[in-house]
Amino acid sequence: MENLLASPKTTFLNLPVSKRDSIVREAVAEFAAQGYQRASINNIVKRLGIAKGSLYQYFENKESLFLYVFESFTQKVKQTVKASVSLERPTDFFLLIKQVLSAGIRFIDEYPDYFQVYMQVVSEHDVPQRDSLIASVRLFSLEYFSPLCEDLQRQGKLRNDISAQMVVFILDATMDRFLRGYARPDLDGGMALAGMQPVQMLGEIDTIIDVLRSGLLAQS
Amino acid sequence: MENLLASPKTTFLNLPVSKRDSIVREAVAEFAAQGYQRASINNIVKRLGIAKGSLYQYFENKESLFLYVFESFTQKVKQTVKASVSLERPTDFFLLIKQVLSAGIRFIDEYPDYFQVYMQVVSEHDVPQRDSLIASVRLFSLEYFSPLCEDLQRQGKLRNDISAQMVVFILDATMDRFLRGYARPDLDGGMALAGMQPVQMLGEIDTIIDVLRSGLLAQS
DNA sequence: TTATAATGTGACCACCTGGTCATAATTATG
DNA sequence: CATAATTATGACCAGGTGGTCACATTATAA
């Protein structure tokens, strides 16, 4: 899972932490704004006020820098998820979804640029190691929800007349769109999710989950 | 609504139809694959086997060519929608959604590159006239569904405890994700929508609509 | 036929890209 | 101090970009 081996040169590792941080920060900002291919190394070094040659003594090339940035992204994701989701088999399935959604909101609030980088990777075709990058951050979705759904269906707690696959799809679709809309207000379809107060945000999440529950619960 | 004024030069309009078509076709292919900014005029003329100067006698610049392509896209969209959706106030709300989804599927099958161009525009930030382009193709969604939902709520046919805005959001989210997943299999989250037989496709659509109905209908 | 208008062409331009490398400045070591 | 190792630098490179323009080619008209 962690075999991406985004390897900075030792020169980078010898740098003071503040400088390393600022390099990553500006790189993230550039990749967030432009995506991988259009991101400009010239831009990054200009923002940092360092020579281009310096950056190439920290990282092998553009791809290496990008992979390092993305790995740092997956770390933050894991942190946030661990801190927000009560792990292991959850008592209430829909409570879990709520926790995941809340974690997503919190992540976007805290690391908006990182989330933009992720969205760019998803929509860009020719990103190095694109598939494994996306896979590495699919903790939730598919691999996580699928077995849970199948369990619940066996227990008769979830509608049995539709495939677990489809249940996961609908869950994923709603969550995906919700977080995208929050991260990029121009995509939220008039929901005005961005700029919403946290408490109201939770209310919207509750509503969504309520609809999902009504739609997906086993009929009485 | 149609004030985009994507204006080819008269030289382009004097061209034989087949040549005009092939030019648009290759331009669409390039914009679909690369998005607006990364799309290469050099690539397009190379594919067409014409000189770069020629293209610039057909269109003022890259932006003008792109706007022409996009306008041609909106035309095809309107054609498809008109041919697929029984217009005016529909008898069954969820039947309407089914028709819109089917129209989307048909459009993607018939004009996959055009749909990719649209998706690129949505995810790209710096596309000329991006906002109005996106708005010009939002016949359905928002402006269309919102008043319908409000009507249904007044008639007590739709849950009254959630805002019409939220209903539209959930509808839009599901439809959006479904069509995206169909157009780009790598995004469908294991649903394997692409390559699915049309009849099975309709089945999946029915399932989704059934879930939405259960989730959104007025509780008994 | 000749004169005129309309098209087609590709070398060329300024600018940008990721990446290199000889050199300079700095730091660590003896 | 001097020597050696490490790090910083930016001119430079090949290759790409959107766009131009003087010129060649073709079609139209008289």
Image: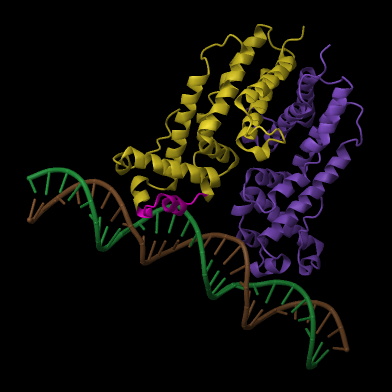
Chain colours: A purple, B yellow, C brown, D green
User: Nearest the camera: B92 or A21?
Assistant: B92
Quarter assignment of residue A192 = top right
Image quarter (top left, top right, bottom left or bottom right) of the C terminus of chain B: top right
B165 w.r.t. A180: above or below: above
Q: Quadrant of residue C11?
A: bottom left
Where does residue B16 sit, x and y in percent of width and height?
31, 40
User: Total label count?
Assistant: 0
Find residue B104 and report its horizontal and vertical position in percent.
57, 27
Residue A161 drawn above or below residue A67: above
The image quadrant where one finds the N terminus of chain B is top left
Identify which residue, B148 or A7, lies in the foreground.
A7
Q: Is residue C28 left or right of residue B106?
A: right
Residue B91 x/y as whole percent: 58, 8
The magenta stretch is B39-53
Q: Which residue corresponds to the image point at 81% horizontal and 62% vertical from the top-left?
A: A17
- The quadrant where residue C24 appears: bottom right
Apparent side of residue A73 relative to residue A43 in the rendered image (left or right):
right
Residue A194 makes an appearance in the image: no
Q: Is residue A69 visible?
A: yes
Please name the residue shown 87% across and 27% down the image.
A151
Residue B50 belongs to magenta span: yes
Main SS type for the magenta part? helix
Q: Is residue A193 above or below residue B55?
A: above
Based on the picture, tell me whether residue B176 belongs to the magenta stretch. Answer: no
Q: Position of residue A15 (x, y in %)?
A: 79, 67
